[in-house]
Amino acid sequence: MGVNRREFLKFVSISTLLGLGGTAVAASVKKEVESSGPYIPDPKALNAKRWAMAVDMSKFKSDEDVQKCIDACHQIHNVPEVDPAHPTQEIKWIWTESYERAFPGNEDEYLAAHYKHMPFLVLCNHCENPPCVRVCPTKATFKRHTDGIVMMDMHRCIGCRFCMAACPYGARSFNFRDPRPFIKKELNPEFPTRTKGVVEKCTFCYERLARGMQPACAEVSNGAIAFGDLDDPDSPVRKVIDNNFTVRRKPELGTHPSVYYVIGGKEHA
Amino acid sequence: MLEKALKGGRTYWTWVAALLAVIGVGVACYIYQFFMGLGITGMSRDVSWGFYIAQFTFLVGVAASGVMVVLPFYLHDYKAFGKITILGEFLAIPAVLMCMLFIFVDMGQPLRVLNVLLHPTLNSVMFYDMCVLAGYLVLNILVGWTSLGAERKGIAPPKWVKPFVILSIAWAPSIHTVTAFLYAGLPGRHFWLSAIMAARFLASAFAGGPALLIILALIVRKYSKFDPGKEAIQTLGKIVTYFMITSTFFLGLEFFTAFYSGIPGHMQSFIYLYKGLDGHHQLVPLMWISTIFAVAALCILVFPFLRRNETILAIAAAMVFISLWIDKGFGLIVGGFVPNPFEGITEYWPTTPEFLIAAGVWAIGFLVLTILYKIAVSIKEESGGEAIH
């Protein structure tokens, strides 16, 4: 008899309600449930000491190339579309900003228009020293010690939004209302949708890494986004950093972001 | 002692009924918010804290200010405050209560509030803020209630209360310091990232709280046979004067650092609040009302002959209170979010339901305050008003 968790709980709760003695029933079915065994990681899973990303802006040839990365991410993560009635309460995990908005404090009125208008992809920086993790009162956002990903536990988040005040990169979004009616694209049943009242953000596609896949944005970027282990000198991300001049957003704040940007690239050098 | 709150005249019951009506509207709006989410507020991705958190911040100051009457009485044996220590303690109780309610109504997942206790996180300032607020509430209830009970019987309060009084005096500044640390430790929020934040918080609290106490003392005198005393009110006036000067001075320090250094990040929030930035100036009129009230109040308060007139003192106290309420109960929080981390501007203004929920919380606070003051004043009327310690 195959009983999954949902059926099991339904069975137990109904039996309890009917006064059939939930515990007695539970004991008999418990074995079935436990026999599912301990969690064994997928042997294909990708592992790293510290995941990082290098975004080479010179390799994006058009706005469509950039948009493809955004759409891929938002589609597989069931990110709701902007509610036209409440545009300032939007939810986004990865999006574009101009140079002076992505790198405030570095603006220069004589900066060549080419750079000024580049659509910089911005997302959670998965900081080595994340202020959002520091301030969270419930550890609902936490840094995974194995690979440095700044994670979100949507079931623990109390929605206090302290992390949003703390993040210097504006990477976090709050579900001001139920997001589900605004998931207009095809729903991805493999990734949970969220409820109202919790904060969310990019999680470096931890769910894909666990199954041996690159983050969605990197996968569709035609090589513009390199992803890999910052700790491994042979990783794709280190190769980009070794061969190009790279910058990070607001490094002066001591957060040690894990997202690097190549602005010029070789063709422009 | 609670039975004292059940006996009152027509004015008393009309006031209570009015508060209950405001509470009812607030609760109805909260139920709406509970089901719809915080999307019904004016808050946004960029301004992710608004009116609720600003009210919380301001009220922590009001709560902490109770120490301004408790300290001179207990540590310096300043007899004139003997009559009003209870008013200070009983102001702190509803103030802390409102703080907690404002945090609660601001939560996206209010039913998960106990996660803060279930997963205590020692690196989060919010955890400490919860601890100090709860502690301060308990201390004030314990000390206030016990002292008043003793006074009712015409005896000195039990000896064991004294250590708790001393503890509450030390505790009061801590609640506002920790609240300032919620803001002052965030990288990338230049407006809040200031070492003087906690000092500013305390100075404005010790001006605004006693200003409210002056008004409350005058109301108590008008509507009851209990007189808090001319000297006590005058001394409160002096406290308000000194701390208002300090508070204004601290604000001036912020202006100097921002504008003499000329660092854009440090200047932008101030420019947004007082002049408007890139065509956005929704808060400018409010901030100027705050400024004008602060200056006008100071012009009155610094002259002893003016503040000796209780009517003029009351007007100055009201201006101090409103000025600081705008500054801390609105501008300080919203200003920290403008401009956003991309130096873009999203403006904020509370929506009607948001405002009504806030009004409801204030009404709950005033109801608790009314009940506590009614009890205290009834007992004072019987005993003649002198506390023994």
Image: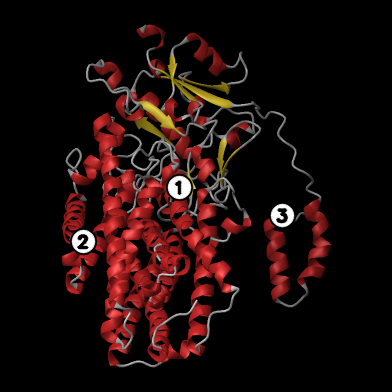
Q: Chain of mark 3?
A: A
Place of residue A83 in the rendered image (x, y in percent of width and height, measured from the top left): 34, 49
Query: In the figure, residue B24 lies in which quadrant?
Result: bottom left
Query: In the figure, residue B292 lies in which quadrant?
Result: bottom left
Amino acid residing under circle 3? Asn
Q: Nearer the viewer, mark 1 or mark 3?
A: 1
Q: Chain of mark 1?
A: B
Residue holding disc 3 = A4
SS at badge 1: helix
Place of residue B88 in the rendered image (x, y in percent of width and height, measured from the top left): 40, 71
Residue located at (36% from left, 56% from top): B39
Q: Is residue A256 left or right of residue B340?
A: right
How far apart are labels 1 and 2 at the CA level?
31 Å
Q: Are marks 1 and 3 on the same chain?
A: no
Q: Is residue B86 above or below residue A58?
A: below
The front one of A67 and B75 is B75
State which quarter of the image contains the C terminus of chain A. Answer: top left
Asked whether the beta carbons under mark 1 and mark 3 sit within 8 Å of each other, the answer is no
Residue located at (48% from left, 62% from top): B169
Residue holding disc 2 = B301
Q: Residues within 10 Å of mark 2 (few under 14, many from 20)?
A: many
Residue holding disc 1 = B181
Amino acid residing under circle 1? Phe
Amino acid residing under circle 2? Leu
Residue located at (73% from left, 72% from top): A15
How far apart are labels 3 and 2 at the CA level?
73 Å
Q: Earlier in the sequence, mark 1 or mark 2?
A: 1
How far apart are labels 1 and 3 at the CA level?
47 Å
Q: Is residue B373 left or right of residue A100?
A: right
Q: Nearer the viewer, mark 3 or mark 2?
A: 2
